[in-house]
Amino acid sequence: GNSVTQMEGPVTLSEEAFLTINCTYTATGYPSLFWYVQYPGEGLQLLLKATKADDKGSNKGFEATYRKETTSFHLEKGSVQVSDSAVYFCALGASGGSYIPTFGRGTSLIVHP
Amino acid sequence: NAGVTQTPKFRVLKTGQSMTLLCAQDMNHEYMYWYRQDPGMGLRLIHYSVGEGTTAKGEVPDGYNVSRLKKQNFLLGLESAAPSQTSVYFCASSPYKLSLGSAEAFFGQGTRLTVV
């Protein structure tokens, strides 16, 4: 079945530092890949997505590239802000006859001033 | 734009009581999901629905029941609440797409439930 593995947190950074959150996956078929963000006290919301191999999703300074050869979708940002403090979830779209997307366990990011 | 709305936002129940959580979406989405979120456990799927009148079990269905009588609503019921059901519950919906895997999920704001 499908699965998503992302790095455990928390990830603690100073403002303006470079961010990488690793995500690898196993999947049946070729689903889209997503990053969701959850701010404190809120639900998840889509941050970015990529629908096929070599696609790059980007939004709000965050980027991730769909790497089929390494089955990865790492999230990066060149310069984080305090307001980026949140929990980030990597996810696979439904595939292989399933209607269920697959989420990683989430990585907490804490950015200090 | 309302999106996905969950009711209530907070609730405290006594062990053995029952309650229903309501999820309503105004985007005409086919698919709807109920998750629970616990510290260190990520999101775990309780039940889901692929259309009006259909429901299916997810990863952790025991102790919960669901119904989808109308396309826009997905109800989650706890018949006899237990302290182990203390959690934050999220509802999500997704649109039908020819390429199902490309559809993003839209989440509600969550219901924080405490069972004492």
Image: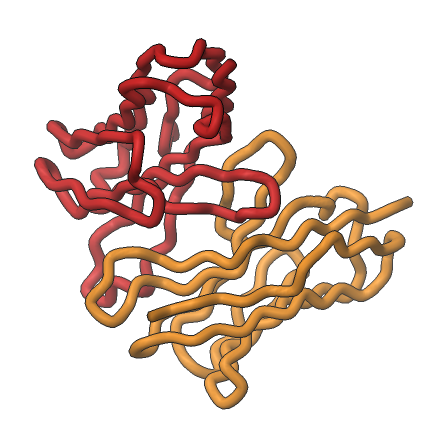
Chain colours: A orange, B red
Q: Is residue B47 above or below residue B72?
A: below
Instruction: Report which quarter residue A113 is drawn in.
Output: top right
Q: Residue furthest left?
A: B53
For the point 69% across and 50% down, the residue is: A108
For the point 42% across and 22% down, the residue is: B82
Between B45 and B71, the one nearer to me in the picture: B45
- Would you say A42 lies left or right of A80 here? left
Q: Residue furthest bottom?
A: A69
Between A66 and B13, the one nearer to me in the picture: B13
- Would you say A101 lies left or right of B38 here? left
**Which quadrant holds the N terminus of chain B?**
top left
Position in image of residue B96 (x %, y %): 21, 53
Position in image of residue A101 (x %, y %): 35, 57
- Would you say A103 lies left or right of A77 here? left
Q: Is residue A103 above or below residue B77?
A: below
Between B75 and B13, the one nearer to me in the picture: B13
For the point 23% across and 45% down, the residue is: B57
Instruction: Report which quarter residue A14 is drawn in.
Output: bottom right
Position in image of residue A107 (x %, y %): 65, 54
For the point 54% across and 86% down, the residue is: A70
Position in image of residue B90 (x %, y %): 42, 35
**Total marks in image:** 0
